[in-house]
Amino acid sequence: MAGTGERARHWRYAELPDVDLLRAQYIRKTFVRHTHEHFVIAAIADGVEVFHHGGGDQYAGAGSLALVNPDTPHTGRAGVPEGWRYGAVYPAPELVSAAIAAETTTLRGTPGFVRPVLDDPYAAELVHRVLRAADEGNALAADTLLRVTVTRLLRMNGGRLPRRPVRTAGAGTAARARAVLEERMADPPSLERLAAELGSSPFALLRAFRAAYGMPPHTWLTDARVRRARRLLDTGTSPAEAAVAVGFTDQPHLNRHFARIVGVPPGAYQRERKNVQDARRELLLPFEA
């Protein structure tokens, strides 16, 4: 992104193993519809981010937070010509529910955020302080500030996530279609062939899948491929090998889709992960007098 005025770093800190971290400035960047396995807690420092969520556009300006629950489809783009600058933490669902919400709030069941945008400059500053502490290698501060941040947000804007709707024939068909796409990710069937295999029609399957997962099958498949590519990159698989393994034609196709969903190219993503793994190994080395 050199020369574009855009920059981003997506990384992990060894002492916060269940949290992804991001610091970025985007101007022309557009995130396609996608989901995250983790919570998204993004603190806007400057500018405005617009993201489609829950059937409409949401606007998050300086001092506010964009909050997205796991597996919730959303997009992202600049809301003003100068773009937006932000820092984000992505805590795992288990960390939020079992390690934080259960101990510090009265929320029970599966906790999540009620509103996708919260105007709270103090909480936004807490997110930036988590990132600074991680940068400085201050494990005690990073862990403490993260827990304080999540607790505050849950108390101000938390609720029990609704249970999944009662299964219908269409929902069952969509679930079976998703399973087929996951199993045959590298060589998926066409919509017509997939529908025929499931005893449905293409348009009925399309409607059912969109209703169940918030996006059509081909968009969901791209999202799922990038998720799987991330897991492969985390284990040391090269970007070129990961691209083929998940069904992209070549590495440039992975690069394009990965950057449009994760925010950084796969090579940069993997380098940061390798740095964390190296740091963790150093922590585990026996002390030598």
Image (cartoon, rainbow, N blue to C red):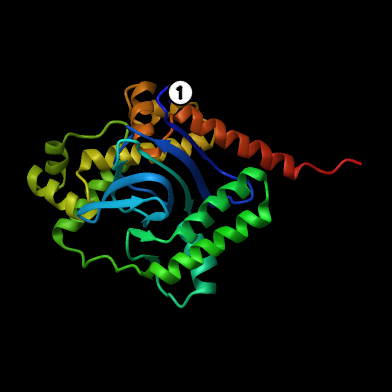
Residue 159 versus residue 118 in the image, above or below: below
* Image height of 203 relative to 268, above or below: below
Q: Measured from the top left, where is residue 232 in percent x and y?
A: 47, 35
Residue 84: percent from left, percent from top: 38, 41
Residue found 26% across the figure and 47% down from its top: 178
Counting from the top left corner in percent of width and height, residue 166 is at 21, 68
Is residue 281 toward the left or the right of residue 123 in the image? right
Q: Is residue 110 visible?
A: no
- Looking at the picture, tell me which residue is in the foreground, 4 or 223: 4
Residue at 61% from the left image edge and 54% from the top image edge? 142
The quadrant the N terminus occupies is top left
The residue lying toward the viewer, choosing from 158 and 83, is 83
> Foreground: 201 or 258?
258
* Element type at mark 1: loop
For image coordinates 56% across by 62% down, the residue present is 147
Residue lying furthest right = 289
Q: Residues within 10 Å of mark 1 (few under 14, many from 20)?
A: few
Kind of residue indicated by mark 1:
Ala
Q: Which residue is mark 1?
A: 2
